Image: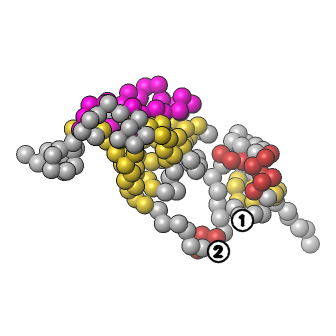
Amino acid sequence: MTTIRLRRGTAAQWTAANPVLAQGEPGVDTTTGALRIGDGTRAWLDLPEFRDAGALAAPQPALDVVRVESLTGGTYALDPVVATYFSLDLGGDVSLTDAGFVEGQSVTVELVQDATGGRGVTLPSSWVGAAAVDVDAEPGTLERLVVWRAAGRMNVQQAAGGPFPLSDSGDDPDHDSS
């Protein structure tokens, strides 16, 4: 009887080597049980993970659909494992970074200027499209960004039509009630 053995290694070994798997070549992370299948171009860390049914059935941290944060400054990491929509109330200048994105994942980010306005938002220069993003600092407005990972790179695009004025009643600024 023939035994077929898949390419395998621990999470630390895969991370350290980060090899490009040949097209259709499977690799198994013996630490997590994750399976990744090569495409001949992307490195291990850029390939999507597949897990066995037992791993998928294990309790996972709760995913917020919307994560609302009040920020007074510093750096804020966008993580698609935490939420798919971030509403960030800016009370100071903030720098955005990415954490935990795998190929094809995206998040929407709502940047809300407080009544003072003037809050700056810095994006990593390595994000494709970052140079084209110009967050309006007008008081009482919001901007929307979409951040995603594709072709092994982080991308960002600003929503057309912004900045959106915030209504006094707290209604959705995209929907006129008149």
In this rendering, does residue 147 appear at all?
yes
| Span of residues in magenta | 120-145
- Kind of residue indicated by mark 1: Gly
Residue at mark 1:
33
* Quarter containing the C terminus: top left
Depth order, front residue of 25/97: 97
Residue at mark 2:
54
Residue in the picture at 51% in, 50% down: 79
Residue 113 pos. (x, y %): 30, 38
Q: Are marks 2 and 1 in contact (CB under 8 Å)?
A: yes
* Quarter containing the N terminus: bottom right
- Kind of residue indicated by mark 2: Gly
Residue in the picture at 66% in, 49% down: 47
Extreme right residue here? 1
Q: Give how far apart the Cα atoms at labels 2 and 1 are.
A: 10 Å
Residue in the picture at 55% in, 38% down: 154
